[in-house]
Image (cartoon, rainbow, N blue to C red):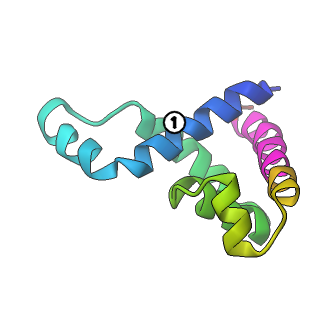
């Protein structure tokens, strides 16, 4: 199984990419595409098959560059609920990324 911290670090890389997407696109024209795009593609493939709540949470938190705190406020949830949702997302990714690799 892919380690929890590996998935967490990958998600942070994905968030970083989307928060600076314009810069990455400019750099891509000069030095070529970043290796993070392969990671993004792998994660997006798994998330596309996820239940709707996991899909929406992934997009809201990582692609739209929200923090747990800001997302809790926007959704009207407690910080603890959003932490739990993030843990569920990471567990889902752990289990399903493993299946994708087999």
The picture places residue 33, in percent across and down from the top left corner, at 28, 36
Left or right, residue 86 beside residue 48: right
Residue 42 location (% of width, % of height): 57, 42
Q: Give the class, few, some or many, for how many residues have Cα within 10 Å of label 1's Cα (few <14, many ≥20).
A: some
Q: Please say if 72 is above or below 16.
A: below
In this view, 19 is above or below 6: below
* The quadrant where residue 94 appears: top right
Report the residue marked by disc 1: 13
Which corner quadrant of the image does residue 12 belong to? top right
* Position in image of residue 35 (x %, y %): 39, 30
Q: How many marks?
A: 1
Seen at 83% across and 26% down, the residue is 1
Prevailing SS of the magenta stretch: helix
The vertical placement of 79 against 77, above or below, is: above
Provide the secondary structure element on which disc 1 rests: helix
Q: Quadrant of residue 9?
A: top right
Q: Answer with left or right where residue 39 lies relative to residue 26.
A: right
Residue closer to the observer: 88 or 38:
88
Specify whether residue 55 is in view: no
- Is 61 left, or right, of 82 in this rendering? left
Residue beneath the point at 21% across and 33% down = 32
The magenta segment:
86-100
């Amino acid at each position: 199984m892919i380690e929890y911290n590996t998935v967490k670090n990958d998600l942070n890389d994905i968030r970083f990419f989307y928060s600076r997407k314009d810069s990455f696109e400019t750099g891509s024209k000069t030095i070529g595409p970043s290796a993070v795009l392969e990671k993004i593609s792998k994660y997006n493939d798994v998330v596309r098959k996820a239940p709707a709540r996991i899909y929406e949470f992934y997009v809201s938190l990582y692609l739209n560059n929200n923090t747990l705190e800001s997302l809790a406020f926007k959704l009207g949830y407690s910080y603890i609920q959003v932490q739990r949702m993030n843990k569920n997302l990471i567990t889902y990714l752990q289990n399903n990324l493993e299946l994708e690799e087999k």
